[in-house]
Image (cartoon, grey):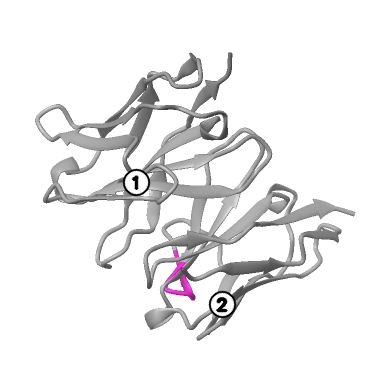
Amino acid sequence: EVQLLESGGGLVQPGGSLSLSCAASGFSFRNYAMNWVRQAPGKGLEWVSTITSGGGTFYADSVKGRFTISRDNSKNTLYLQMSSLRAEDTAHYYCAKDRGGTYFPYFDYWGQGILVTVSS
Amino acid sequence: EIVLTQSPGTLSLSPGERATLSCRASQSVSSTYLAWYQQKPGQAPRLLIYGASSRATGIPDRFSGSGSGTDFTLTITRLEPEDFAVYYCQQYGSSLTFGGGTKVEIK
């Protein structure tokens, strides 16, 4: 059974930093692109970042230069390092697995999400 | 960037009725690279449809997807109580973007 478990969320002040983790199990983690997708409270879904199986990284314009996605295949873990956080980064952050087979991802498994709140 | 517009914003229907949800793209979506997700309150999204018309694993056959180019449709033939939720479309043919969602609520 595929499981994705996010951790590391919480309250952070504007301008601060926070790191999210996503522990994956139940599939061959190293063979799949992994992603972060966020959802502001009461709003729709927004793609944040992708890391390919080969380590290539892609970011939404809204987070480029502030967020860094990475992965540790030996630990089956995905990370998102967030810095220079803004109020508009407040959202539930979901770790999502790419189903594979296409250049751009779509998501067949999602974590339960973790809340990041940016507020003073 | 391809913008996806979903309509209607809210669909009020009764169990057993048919639901038809629309997703319109600002440009043609390559190779019908369009997916649909269902999200219930407090839960993560769930993949329903990919490639515009292929059902994901475990998805009941009352869910079907159709369309190509710029116009796509998700149809739920007979609404079950557990189908009342928000539905999102996503294109993955040119970068990736999500639609704003359609809420299917109980009438």
Q: Position of residue B70 (x, y in %)?
A: 55, 82
Which residues, given as a range, are shown in magenta? B50-55
Quarter of the image for residue B50 reads bottom left
The residue lying at 37 percent from left, 82 percent from top is B31
Q: Quadrant of the N terminus of chain A?
A: top left
- Find the residue positioned furthest to the bottom: B69
The residue lying at 50 percent from left, 86 percent from top is B69
Label 2: few (<14), some (14–19) or many (≥20) C-alpha neighbours in 10 Å: few
| Of residues A94 and A18, the one drawn nearer to the viewer in this rendering | A18
Q: Position of residue A85 (x, y in %)?
A: 45, 27
Q: Which mark is residue B26?
A: 2
Q: Which kind of residue does numbered mark 1 sit on?
A: Ser
The residue lying at 47 percent from left, 32 percent from top is A112
Q: Chain of mark 1?
A: A
Quarter of the image for residue B88 reads bottom right
Quarter of the image for residue B96 reads bottom left
Residue B47 vs A67, above or below: the answer is below
Q: Which mark is residue A49?
A: 1
**Marks 2 and 1 belong to one chain:** no
Residue B72 vs B49, above or below: the answer is below
Residue A103 vs A114, above or below: the answer is below
Say left or right for B35 vs B79.
left
Q: Position of residue A74 (x, y in %)?
A: 9, 30
SS under mark 2? loop
SS under mark 1? strand
Residue B17 vs A69, above or below: the answer is below
| Of residues B20 and B58, the one drawn nearer to the viewer in this rendering | B20
Q: Chain of mark 2?
A: B
Q: Is residue B62 visible?
A: no
Q: Is residue B54 magenta?
A: yes
Q: Is residue A42 magenta?
A: no
